[in-house]
Amino acid sequence: MTQTRSPRGGPRPTSRKLARQDAGARKDARKDAGPRTGKAGKPSPASKPSPSKPRKAAQKPAAAKPGSAAPRPGAPAPSAALPPKRVQRAAAAATLATGIQTLLVEPDEGEMRLDRFLSARFPQLAFTHIQRIIRTGQLRVDGKRMKPNERLAAGQSVRVPPLKMEEQRPRSPTRNESDAAFLQSITLYEDKDVLVLNKPAGLASQGGSGTTRHVDGLLEALRDEKGEKPRLVHRLDKETAGCLVVAKSRFAASVLAKSFRSRVTRKVYWAIVAGVPKTRQGRVSTYIAKEMLPDGDSRMRVAQHGDDGAEHALTYYAVIEQSARKLTWVSLKPVTGRTHQLRVHMASVGHPIIGDPKYFNVENWELPGGIQNRLHLLARRIVIPHPRTGKPIDVTAPLPPHMQQTFNLLGLETDAYDPIVEAPEE
């Protein structure tokens, strides 16, 4: 048979050879396209790799346990093991971390102190941390810096820096019951809006550095079904006992706070001081400013008008009774409400309150035997208009145990006439 030649001079392939080449090309195309599947998803025989081109063997799936069902095509993979608890806690903290926020002061939040506004909005933040971000200027109100005790106005814009808050652990029912029972045991007055407590000496009003148990924390036990927690309207020093007013709603807190600021609220304190004042009824009017001590602690001092941070403070006092010209029972009426005001004022007139670790400044003075070296200061009485009715709430606190012991030793009677009622209101 004569072979035909191609135009280039080579032998022209026959029709049989062309058919074989075409079949080989189709086979190569099937291999490039992947294995074909037949019914029930099984690979067809044509999908087997060519022996002339060995491929890397695929990893065999793990054999199913006897009696277990085979996984369906497209089923999700089984979940991985949970991460360690420390990783979970870190993830929770990161979730709780906030970015820069801008808060609008609501109408019922107007006239609130800046630090208390933040405490109400961010209950997971420690009060000391709130004070720090305000004092360092990280927080701005309408673009300006403010002091922690300055008041907000409704509609103001509060820029809050990023915060990293601790995840709150749920309180145990046993602790809630215990704290609620304790608060009930020191309650002097209560209705649906107002709670007046007889704060014991030694219990702080709010948390601070190293302070874990305080009134503000105990009030968590009284959080209602809406999640609203009663809030402090004012504060007492840790070692001062007596009447402490608590608002049970945001509305009550706003109205009661205005009563304190407008000086409609009347407060009477009792104290035992060293010596006997020459003037049986007097008035102490000074400026008070904060000063830092070499050991890093702070205290208040009598300042001059114009001094940095100086604020005016006014107190009326009256002698109720004296004992052997060494101790005097005095009644005090603060018109203003500065930090440590009564303690600073009595020390400034030469008659500091006995047991005062910060301001007692009498040299060569010894505490009479049988009297405890504790602050003898009691928030005896408070009269404040009710936030809804305007009618006065008049509450009186009993003497704390250490002051009752002193009264017994000195023969003082609590029903004696208190001339402070005659003192001016302003």
Image: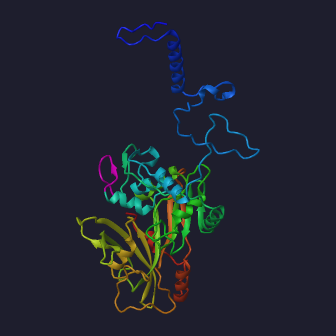
Q: Nearer the viewer, residue 51 or 382?
A: 51
The image shows residue 2, relative to residue 313, as above or below, that is above
Q: Which x, y percent locates residue 126?
A: 45, 61
Is 146 colored magenta in this rendering?
A: yes
The image shows residue 272, relative to residue 397, as above or below, that is below
Q: Nearer the viewer, residue 336 or 1?
A: 1
Q: Can the viewer see residue 419?
A: yes
Q: Residue at x 48, y 50 (%)?
A: 95
Query: Outermost residue toward the left?
Result: 306
Q: Residue at x 36, y 58 (%)?
A: 133
Start-end of magenta stretch: 137-147
Q: Which x, y percent locates residue 91?
A: 50, 53
Visual colour scheme:
rainbow
Q: Quadrant of the C terminus?
A: bottom left
The image shows residue 27, relative to residue 183, as above or below, that is above
Q: Can the viewer see residue 167?
A: no
Q: Residue at x 42, y 80 (%)?
A: 356
Query: How many marks are shown on the rendered structure?
Result: 0
Q: Which x, y percent locates residue 212?
A: 51, 69
Is 248 colored magenta in this rendering?
A: no
Horizontal arrangement in the rendering, residue 52 relative to residue 137 (left or right)? right
Horizontal arrangement in the rendering, residue 183 relative to residue 286 (left or right)? right
